[in-house]
């Protein structure tokens, strides 16, 4: 019998010029004490320093920079 695989979770946070809100959201997600949690922040070409702030504050968060504002569905 094969051992069950551990449950994994991925949270995707979309950001566009909302640095403070994005950082607050990521802080909330960071408080989840559970193994196997991956957090991804997709930045839709913010000009307010969101991507750099996320990288500096939450080094474990994967930051993807879209390069353009793709909207919610595109992001």
Image (cartoon, grey):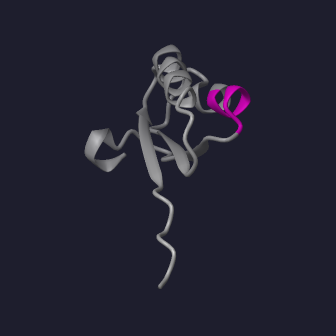
Vertical position of residue 49 compared to residue 14: above or below: above
Residue shown at 55% from the left, 52% from the top? 36
Numbered marks: total:
0
The quarter of the displayed image where residue 13 is located = top left
Foreground residue among 18 and 68: 18
Q: Is residue 58 a member of the stretch shown in magenta? A: yes
Principal SS element in the magenta part? Answer: helix
The x, y position of residue 33, in whole percent, is 57, 34
The spot of residue 58 in percent (x, y) is 67, 31
> On the rendered structure, is 44 left or right of 33?
left
Picture coordinates of residue 25 (x, y %)? 47, 23
| Residue pictured at 51% horizontal, 45% vertical | 40
- Report the residue that reaches farthest toward the bottom: 1
Position of 69 compared to 42: left or right? left
Q: Residue furthest left?
A: 73
Q: Report the magenta residues as a range.
A: 54-59
The residue most toward the front is 1
Q: Residue 35 at what x, y percent from top left?
A: 58, 47
Q: Looking at the image, which residue is at 53% across and 43% down?
A: 39
Q: Nearer the viewer, residue 2 or 23?
A: 2
Give the quadrant of the C terminus. Answer: top left
Image height check: is 54 above or below 8? above
Q: Residue at x 56, y 22 (%)?
A: 27
Q: Nearer the viewer, residue 9 or 52?
A: 9
């Amino acid at each position: 019998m094969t051992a069950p695989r551990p449950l994994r979770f991925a949270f995707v946070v979309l950001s566009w010029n909302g640095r403070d809100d994005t950082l607050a959201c990521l802080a909330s997600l960071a408080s989840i004490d559970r193994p196997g949690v991956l957090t991804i922040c997709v930045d839709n070409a913010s000009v307010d320093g969101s991507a750099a702030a996320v990288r500096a504050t939450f080094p474990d968060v994967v930051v993807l920079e879209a390069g353009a504002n793709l909207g919610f569905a595109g992001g």
